[in-house]
Each structure stands twice: as structure tokens, then as C-alpha cells.
Image (tube, helix red, strand yellow):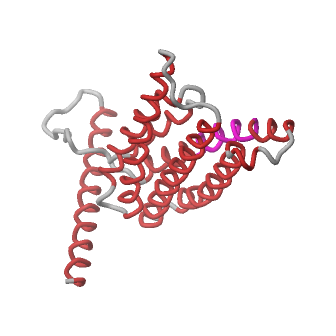
Amino acid sequence: MGFGSLFLGYFLLLNITYYGFTDIIAALIMLTALLRLAPLYRPFKLGVYAASVFAVFGAFELVARSMELFGLGFIDGVWLSYVAVIRYVIISVLTALILLGIKEAASEVGATRLRTRAHRMLYCTFFLYLLSIAAEAPTLGALLPDKALAVLILVTLIGTLVVIGFNLSVIWGANAEICMPEDDKPMSEDKKSRFGFVNEYKRRQREKDEEYAKYRAERLKKKRQKRDKKK
């Protein structure tokens, strides 16, 4: 499935210095991952739209930052703050949809701890980005003393790294507990290795592949039944 790719794309959000050059890459990788997850859970389907918006915004950032390198920047002053606020809103919505999707998937497969972690990180993510928006918004920032604003910015920078790190652990947990191995290259039962542990690994992989195939077949069956009822 797409949790591995989702992890890689979300990992790029750790770049808090030159994100104008990497947001487009992160968005496209996450979009690819969410397109693969979308048929299974509705939050991931909505996440496709959020990732698409993020990709368009990332392209805008890339153009703006690239032009700055040649002294042709067209975003400065207060507009930089508004751009940052928009970015925080997009990322917070996208992250929330990813966590909701993982929460729903974890509930379905009985991964209670993963579901609880995803649920908690929803609140942490929104709290962090509310602070980030407060730190960047020109009107709110003007109301705070300089020292208080500096502390708030420092807290949000550290908090961003911490929250993204925990969200990455949730996505990685989903990859381990929910995602079944891809069956693009099925293991062959005819080719036996002289090493017993290799044969055992292949056997377990085949079992997981079969389990995942049954799981997806059941999901598709339920979706068809729902569509038939609506009709």
C-alpha cells in the first residue's frame, strides 16, 4: 500500500528552512501515496484533494523562491506572513486527514494503540498549527511584545519538529501494523533457498500477501453492497 511513500513525503516536512524548494516534492509523493490509499478509506480520499492543493501551493512556492535567487522576488514584507499562514492551514488539514485515515484503518484491524496515538496527534497537530498561525499572522503578532513573539516563534519551530516526528512514528506504525506487503513481485514457492530462515521469510510473506488479498476483496465487496443499497 502507500504508507511507505506517505512516510517519505511527510518526512520532507522536517525541512523548516528551505521548505519552499521541497514542499512540491513532499506534496507529490504524498499525493501518489494517498491515491493508492483512497479506495480504502474516505479520509484518504479527501486527503487526495488536500495533497493536490498542497502541490499547487508548493509549485507557487518553488516559483517564488526560485525568482528570489535572481533578485526577482515578488513576495515580501507582510505577504510572506500570509503565505506562511496559508501553508500552515493546508498542512494541518492534510495531516488531519492522514491521521483520521490511519485512525479508521487501525480501528478496523484492531490496532488499538495505533488508533489512540493517531487520535492524540490530531489534537497536538491542530494546537501546534494554531500557535504557528498566531506567530505568523500580522494582526496577532502586532499585539504581542517582541520578546513574547520571539518565544512563541521558537516554541513553534521546536514544536513543529516534535509533532512531525511523532506523526511520522504514527505513519510508520501504520506501515507496520496495517499495511500488508505489496504483491507486485510475488514470491515463488518453487525456488527454495539453502538457508532455512530465507524460506521461512518467504512463507510468511506469502501468507501476508494472501491475507491482504482477502482483506481487499472483502472491502470491495462491502463497497459494492453499499452502492447497491443506495441505488
Quadrant (top left/top right/bottom left/bottom right) for the C terminus: bottom left
Query: Residue 217 falls in which quadrant of the image?
Result: bottom left
Image spot of residue 3 (x, y percent): 40, 46
Residue sitting nearer the eye, 60 or 92: 60
Image spot of residue 74 (x, y percent): 51, 29
Query: Residue 136 falls in which quadrant of the image?
Result: top right
Residue drawn at the location 42% of the way across and 66% of the way down = 108
Of helix, strand and loop, which mostly describes the magenta segment?
helix
Work out whether residue 4 can be spotted: no
Residue found farthest to the left: 190
Q: Is residue 222 left or right of residue 26?
A: left
Q: Is residue 182 left or right of residue 70?
A: left
Q: Is residue 159 magenta?
A: yes
Image spot of residue 89 (x, y percent): 55, 51
Is residue 11 positioned above or below 38 on the image?
A: above
Q: Start and end of the magenta stretch?
A: 154-166
Work out whether residue 221 can be spotted: yes
Residue drawn at the location 23% of the way across and 84% of the way down = 229
Q: Is residue 206 magenta?
A: no
